[in-house]
Amino acid sequence: MSHLTKKRPVFLRKYLSLAAGIALMSMIDPYELHAQQVELNFKNANVKEVITSLSDHYGYEFVFDGNLLKTARPISVNLKLSSIEDALSILFKDQPFSYRLENKRIILYRKTVSTNSQLVRGKVIDSLGNTIAGVSIHNLQDNSQAMSSGDGDFELNVTSPEIQLSFRHVSFNEKVMRFSPEQVTRPVRVMLSTKESMLNEIMITGYQRISKERSPGAYSMINNDQLNKQINVDLASALEGQVAGLTYIKNPARVAADNPVLRGIGTYSSDVTTNPLIVIDDLPTELTLNDINPYDVESVTVLKDATAASIYGARAANGVIVVTTKKGKGQGVSVNFNVDQFITQKPDIAKMHYASTSDLIDYEIDVYNKERSRYANTESLFNYYGKLGSGSLKYYSPLYDLFRKESIGTINQQERDATINTWRNNDYIKEFTDNVWQNETRQRYNASISQNSSKSNTFVSFNYDKGKGQVVHEKNDKFNLYLKSAFNITKWLNATVGLNGTYSVNKETDGIYNDLFLQPRYTRIKDENGNLVYAPYVDLSSSIGPGSAINGETAEQIAANGNLKSTSFNVLEALGEGIESNKSLNLRAFTSLRATIYKGLSFQTQFSYELGQASRESFYDEDSYMMRVASNAMVSYNAATGVYTKNLPAGGRYYQFESKRYNYTFRNQFNYDNTFGQYGQHQLTALAGFEMRQSHVPRPIQQLLVGYNPVTLTSTTIDWATLSKSGITSYIYGGNVRLGDLNGVAQKETLHRFTSLYANAGYTYSNKYNLTGSIRVDQADLFGVDPKFKYRPLWSVGAGWNVSNEEFMKNKDWLNSLKLRATYGITGNVDQESSSYGTATWKSDKLFPYLQYLEQKSLPNPMLRWEKTTTTNLGVDFSIFDNRLSASIDAYNRYSSDLLIGAVLDPTVGANSRVINNGALRNKGIEFNINTVWLKRKDLTASTQLVFSFNKNRVEKVNGLTATAQSYVGSPTNYFFQGRSYNAVLAYRYGGMVNGYPYFLDQNGESNVIFDENGTPTKINAINSPDALVDMGTLFPKYTGSINQRLRYKAFDLSAMFVFSGGHKLRKDAIDLASDELTNAGLVNRWAEGANNDYPRLLVDYPDNLRSSAGTLSTLWRYSDQQILSADYIKLRNIAVGYQLPKQLAHKAGMQNVRLTAQVNNLWTWSAAGNDIDPESYSLNSGTRYLPLAKSFLMGLSLTF
């Protein structure tokens, strides 16, 4: 048996070699290699002969009236030219006709006989060579006007002898040019520079590119300058604080990525994603923001409302994030190199508020004495915890074991007390953080090469990212390749091809060892000399098979038995065992072909294919702690013969799991963009297309081998049916023990297909009034078989008014732009785990493996449909005082209906309840994005950006299943009250405290605890009615935002970003009143007889007859209204200082640009809750602390050649 991963490096090398070859080949411009000059040699040739020759050489079709050539002059030339434009300008210079080029046709027409009129033709482009539509061209001499078409072309008849043209566009700086009559005999080319405040104002929806002034939609754009003003950990962090309405739901334990949410949560189902759809270079992707190399990104556009998002159909209810990758700029070849270094400190363990070692010992002694008092003698107490083979083994701590040893005479009282006093000086947590934790380090290297010419454009980047984790032995390596090449094959045809690949390897330790309380705080990891200290046993079960925790007496018996393996343990040694290797490969290939059919009309076909492959494998050798425990558990003993049987073979345990996914998107689309009318006042943009998508997740592959030898790659065959199903009688545990199998991973294959028709149109009149509309119809295997649910269109309409372009606003010098806009539309979301058909799982019986049967999973649902979100958006954009102050303000109302949620059914349908489209949820909000340049001097510029959003949600409809009060309190994402907030913080009403016993008020306002005259409870009732709960607010922040401050002085720049969040609640980390295993510092503040009775009793303080009720009071105490705090916070997320090397110095070093950046992340936090509570590292509903975010120090170097 061989490791599957043995072949991976070979594949990776082949993949990288192939990719590098493609990248190098793509840098060669085929048009520059094969461009050739045409030799033109005519002597007194008539024009027809010349036209025939030109048509043969260049492939153009000539259109003309035969009478037009009767007065044409003979042509005599001898020259070499490569351009048809150059040839025409020379050959037809003195002819009585003019010409114009339209695609592959050359149209000849008679010159006007009027000496007072002349036709000016040309094209308007930006600095990158992209054509600009909607440019207003005005001849300042005779007031004649025109407007550039969708291809940037314009024609203007002028009557004045002088030609002075003004070119104006809302996103570009005005340009005035003078032309002589001779200069305009051939087409002119005009380049406009982008306004500094408008560098990001071309909205990219993924289906089209449209200027901001023409779009009524709500969106945010982040350009390359904004993305790179600081060093970004990943693309997700680069967007934080940049987009109003975009909130990240933090994963406090940081075991997974944070979830981005746009404009609130609009679903009840955990199977329906709340993440926005990610689009890369016009095509949807299954990649996440964290999978995208931020150095490959040119800009990001976030579509918030229905106007643009509706054309994505049943995937866009959560918004759309459109990522545009870089391409070559300027002319020639450019090389960029970036090096980034990250160092993250260890978390501040003091902020966890753990009890000290001495306090924990005192508390545990109290617990022991209380428990000992319930037994006749010490022996009876430890008999309760079980002995070898008793069938009921239970763990007790080393402190308990010390009392046991004293009771049997192994040690005396003085030795016991001396040992305890020594333990008070120990600190397992400190030793753990000193020896197990390390500063996280990360190095990132990125190299990119770009090339641009008139015929081709290529961008290639290579990225290598490596780092070490917080825990020793943990490390990661990641490789990323991105290639994109565009070719202008002809004037009417261009193509794009690309490849993106990511390969990563992560090494992780067994997470079970990362528990800070894996061993008591009074134990040790190393002694004073640095030698490992081994515990004879620990409270730890095997994570890979049978074998649960044991106790001190059992550990001694195992150690004395030569047929069993040692149970000694040291965490530093164990961390190096069973290292899990996680490998992932993501490939994305894409291509696009665009053909211009006629003026303003084009056809585009696009295709992308994605492959994702993930694997993990782990190996525990036979001497590892987990294998020793599992091996001991699988030992059986025959008392009659005295024979021990080792049912687990010698050798290690090897586990491997592999999963794959395949996705493709195929799209065909017609685009139309044209300007018409006498003065070009009408502009129409439209598209229509057809799209097919498929996602396929094959069945996973996994294998589990025991008796494995990594050298010979062999394993031992065992009787799995007996050992994992029937089990054996364990010598240690006394009862039936099973080996365990493949953790019950179901063999499941998922295939979904979508087909869609869509259309979008926008009309602009005089650059003032905009109307848009879109519609899409999705077909998928997910929707119900009822036709009325299969053909439900998603659509949107929008309107915009560019007020600043009105005549009555022209003289307002203080106003740069003012726009009002409104949109309304319907988008959708889909649950890919649901089916309109009945489903069942094929299963086999554990005891009788050959007995197989079907277990029904879900009933058919012919009315299954997508979840629908209707969005109304009103917005205003303005810029004043020479763009020194600009803002975008949006107000929205999102109503989500047909939400999937459990509902009570008529039992006659075959089930009492079922998840159906049966809920509604509303999100209302307002968003601000305000930018101001409040200081602007020659060498000094200061600017501030305020991003703010307010969101309030409400459960509009929920006919869910009835539940207890605790369900609503403990699971706010599964149980809802109509008329209240989603994720509502519900709490029990605290009544007070008597003699250390808290009491609470039920739905009738009555105490749930009845006391006698001495303050002792005689009856403790549970509170089950949801009517007894009070609404304390919501777990989801009502307002979020950021303040970004940027200061530039000569070659230096300073930026700082504060983020804030508020309007939501959290629960205190209240101590558990029903557990004897406490670690919280709050255990010191507890009830004591005759002392301050403001503190509640802990379980150790309860009399025996009330201990069973402690759980009820503990739950009510932890989830009561007096435990609620504000979750508001403000953080200095990052502060960065940058230095740009002067150009002349950079050029002397052979470089175009050199930049250095130093940055600190998570430098400062203010929390309204206080007490070192960080809401980003905290479970808001359960009141559980997680390790706080640590400070990170970053250094970056950027070089451009």
Image: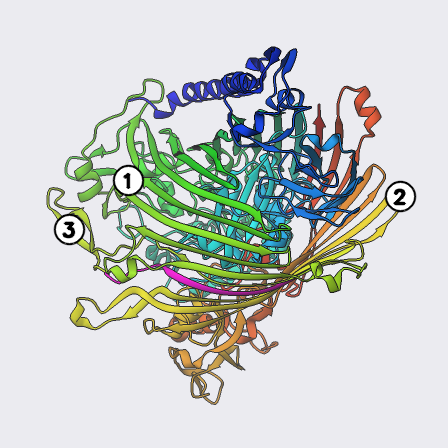
Residue at which label 1 appears:
742
Measure the alpha-carbon separation of dots 3 and 1: 20 Å
Residue 1006 location (% of width, % of height): 45, 88
Q: Secondary structure at mark 3?
A: strand
Q: Secondary structure at mark 2?
A: loop
Residue at which label 3 appears:
854
Asked if 459 appears above or below 303 in the picture, the reply is above
Q: Is residue 183 magenta?
A: no
The mark that comes first in sequence, 1 or 2, is: 1
The mark that comes first in sequence, 3 or 1, is: 1
Residue 851 location (% of width, % of height): 10, 45
Residue 136 location (% of width, % of height): 69, 48
Residue at the (37%, 64%) spot, across then down = 899
| Camera sees residue 457 | no
Instruction: State the quadrant of the N terminus.
Output: top left
Asked if 721 appears above or below 144 in the picture, the reply is above
> Magenta region: which residues?
862-877
Would you say the residues marked 1 and 2 are in contact, meaning their CB atoms lie under 8 Å apart?
no
* Foreground pick, 313 / 365: 313
Q: Is residue 888 left or right of residue 915?
A: right
Residue at which label 2 appears:
938
